[in-house]
Image (cartoon, helix red, strand yellow):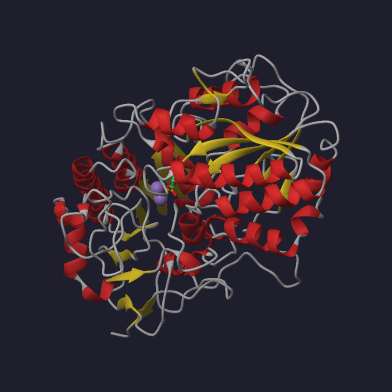
Amino acid sequence: MASSGFSWTLPDHPKLPKGKPVAVVVLDGWGEANADQYNCIHVAQTPVMDSLKNGAPERWRLVKAHGTAVGLPSDDDMGNSEVGHNALGAGRIFAQGAKLVDQALASGKIYEGDGFNYIKESFENGTLHLIGLLSDGGVHSRLDQLQLLLKGASERGAKRIRVHILTDGRDVLDGSSVGFVETLENDLSQLREKGIDAQIASGGGRMYVTMDRYENDWDVVKRGWDAQVLGEAPHKFKSALEAVKTLRAEPNANDQYLPPFVIVDDSGKAVGPVLDGDAVVTINFRADRMVMLAKALEYADFDKFDRVRVPKIRYAGMLQYDGELKLPSRYLVSPPEIERTSGEYLVKNGICTFACSETVKFGHVTFFWNGNRSGYFDETKEEYVEIPSDSGITFNVAPKMKALEIAEKARDALLSGKFDQVNGVNLPNGDMVGHTGDIEATVVACKAADEAVKIILDAVEQVGGIYVVTADHGNAEDMVKRNKAGKPALDKSGGIQILTSHTLQPVPVAIGGPGLHPGVKFRNDIQTPGLANVAATVMNLHGFEAPADYETTLIEVADN
Ligand SMILES: O=C(O)[C@H](O)COP(=O)(O)O
Ligand SMILES: [Mn+2]
Ligand SMILES: [Mn+2]
């Protein structure tokens, strides 16, 4: 921050001491909901989390983890890892990608920026390709934003448009892909009536095609590249609707994992490979699952898989996905500028930090936690450990994931005495297994996460430290779609509809440990606290006052 008088030095907290190690544990996808058979956290044996909830009423509370509390457009938006970890780390609420894109589309500014002007130069002679997640989940992308962009680009000269869809079933109900494709097909046919050559060119399920993250499995991105760029895939169809309906009719088919397909013309030729002179926009606003494709599209030097053919294109992201890497270099909407995060403050105030998760959540506790920034602030004071995730499986097959290994690393970091803060230890189970929709496996996952918490809390006990246990959003606590009355919503055949997505539920925050000053308790004068209130709380527990513009602390210290 350039303003005069700014200082990184945090004032001393008037009452709380320094020097107590603080462990911040994030249970991914662990919300609070009514107890029934679809609440996997309730069904699972979770004695440690139960004891936090039931043991100390003044040191356990719920906070909001969705909607406007985390910078999303409305309170109908469920929370997600990006916005949750941003809020936890940054201690303030920033308008997030979903909202920034909404605003840019509504004001028309999206069409005035450098990014759009850059791709526009391909409109005369080339094709505009739009690649991204097709759903209204609002976590990575939104269908209505795609619809507006299609309209806006065609009104501004795009004559030939190809859409490369990724079916969802993770942030939305499985099977909803068919309806989204129908909606998109309808829009494209209206464009065709106006003389624009617009169609869907390829597709595949997001978890099997394109949307890997944190470089867990490049084959996922390669499958997408082959279909989208090269126009090659094992399945060929005349229309996307036929593709999705046919592929969904296979046994155990699932929107998240549909195999890659290309749309071909009557002569069997792919209708939309990416060619020299074309423009490409990746329409997801969220970074983690687009950055790998962005690298493949943008980097001249690239060795993660054989791209076979690298077309000379004009490429822009919906947002810039990585500000440090400046990737992609062109983008339609500027990302939120999340600066002065708690991690940076604490390091600059001498706090040595350890962060850890497994690959599929590693960037959550580093990149997202640090305001969408890669790398260390000060490598002499920080250590980030990534435990390799299983790849090529769905996590209901191995629901314990690497929770034990993550907890052991956190324990060892605490016992080593090298770190003041063991921070953002993310336990992925409730979320990653919750997304599979497998209730039995999610129960196993929740138990494993609870056991991991125990290992970390035992270590906190041993070192006389303090713990803060929280979550980034809900998921495993509700695995069924509900009607307005809160009862399971039945489908046409009378069956329940499994909810694979996150929820709107609040999440717990628990504090404790032998190092906690005995007078510390949660305040009850904050109306609707959210995840952004946690950062100031953690700073206090380190013996500092939080910066004045941070969301207020959750705690107060009684004199005794
Ligand atoms: O990317 C995903 O896995 C889901 O869309 C959202 O889950 P996350 O926000 O927990 O990563
Ligand atoms: Mn999450
Ligand atoms: Mn999730």
Tell which of 351 and 119 is nearer to you: 119
Asked if residue 364 can be seen in this view, the reply is yes
Label tally: 0
Tell which of 238 and 337 is nearer to you: 238
* Quarter of the image that includes the C terminus: bottom left
Q: Please say if 48 is above or below 272.
A: below
* Quarter of the image that includes the N terminus: bottom right
Residue at 58% x, 50% y: name it.
Answer: 372
Q: Please say if 320 is above or below 307.
A: below
Determine whether, in the image, residue 121 is placed left or right of residue 530.
Answer: right
Asked if residue 381 can be seen in this view, the reply is no
Report which quarter residue 510 is drawn in.
bottom left
Residue at 52% x, 50% y: name it.
Answer: 368
Tell which of 133 and 415 is nearer to you: 133
Q: Could you say where residue 426 lies in the image, as x and y percent from the top left?
A: 37, 47
Q: Could you say where residue 67 lies in the image, as x and y percent from the top left?
A: 47, 66
Residue at 66% x, 54% y: name it.
Answer: 148
Residue at 25% x, 37% y: name it.
Answer: 399
Q: Please say if 146 is above or below 265.
A: below
Q: Could you say where residue 508 lies in the image, as x and y percent from the top left?
A: 31, 64
